[in-house]
Image: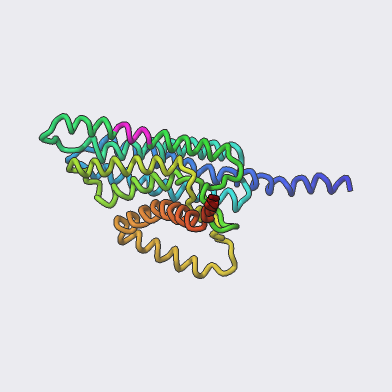
Amino acid sequence: MDDQAPKRRKEDQPSRRLRKGMYILPSLFTTLNIAAGYYAILQITHATVAEPWHLDNAAKAIGFAVLFDGLDGRIARMTKTSSDFGRELDSLADVITFGLAPALLAWMWGFRLLPSLSNAELHTKLLQLGAISSFLFLIAGTSRLARFNITVNPQPSNPGRPGKKYFVGMPIPASAGVVAAMVHFSDGEPVSSWWMALTWLLVVVALAYLMVSTWRFYSFKEIDLRSRQPFRLIIFFGLLFAGIWYFSGPLLFAIALLYMFSGVFWRLQWVFRRRSNRPPPPAYKEASQTS
């Protein structure tokens, strides 16, 4: 028995090393997330009116980062290699890639490269308001990440079906995806009129509000890639990737807006349903007048 113990320990060493190596895999995707965000920031700083394709490259980088962000968490759960270090690294990566990078992209695409207007004062005000709205996007996304990290089993203010998993507030990767999808849909061509800049201002502020709200957004965590019958998922993802490959601009634009307005729709549906189910007020009985 004493001779077999060292042999077992030697046999367990490769499995332990493999187990430790698996912890690196989710962090590698998080590192790719950070790299994509850094590349996006570099492209934004190189963008000009004559070279708007830098903004499109930044939008594409943020789109790939959304994919990497989804993979690192799912791989960590599938391999059971979640750790405190991985969660903190993922949050810091999200601040850079889905907070700072899309805030800069939103400001550069919608306000900084706006052509000079006949009304110089209006142009200056739009630049200032654009900077403020972009900062609101950044601080709202950072606050949502902080709330997500400290909240245990968060519940939205407008609950959905029991058993289904929802995000409380719009996730910061989804909000960054909306910014990136709109820029990519325009091939990086910056906003060219004051009313478009004003509309973009309202969109950025709305995204900031949705992130800090307590409205429900579907999490897609119920999708099981390890199911025994993944045939439908294979067909769905195959069609999705083919559509993105050939029609990335309009398809990603539609998906981003659909997810954004889904939270608004569910909120309004819940408000109207609660009002319709509200019990009627008690009828006031008129006191009989005695002569």
What residue do we see at 30% from left, 32% from top? Answer: 131
Give the camera-side residue of 214 and 12: 214
Write down the region rendered in magenta.
Answer: 131-136
Does residue 53 appear left or right of residue 140 in this picture? left
Give percent across and percent down for residue 205. 35, 40
- Can residue 72 be seen here? no
Which x, y percent locates residue 155? Answer: 56, 47
Check the image and report above or below for 208 versus 269: above
Question: Is 244 left or right of 13, judged from the image as shown?
Answer: left
> Which is nearer the eye, 109 or 73?
109
Q: Is residue 83 visible?
A: yes
| Residue at the right extreme, as displayed | 1
Q: Main secondary structure of the magenta part?
A: helix
Toward the front, the furthest residue is 291
Residue 1 picture location, percent across and down: 89, 48
Tell whether position 64 is magenta. Answer: no
Q: Residue furthest left?
A: 118
Which corner quadrant of the image does residue 240 belong to?
bottom left
* Residue at 14% in and 35% down: 116
Q: Position of residue 273 (x, y in %)?
A: 48, 57
**Magenta residue check for 133:** yes
150 with respect to 120 (left or right):
right
Which residue is located at x 77 percent, y 45 percent?
A: 9
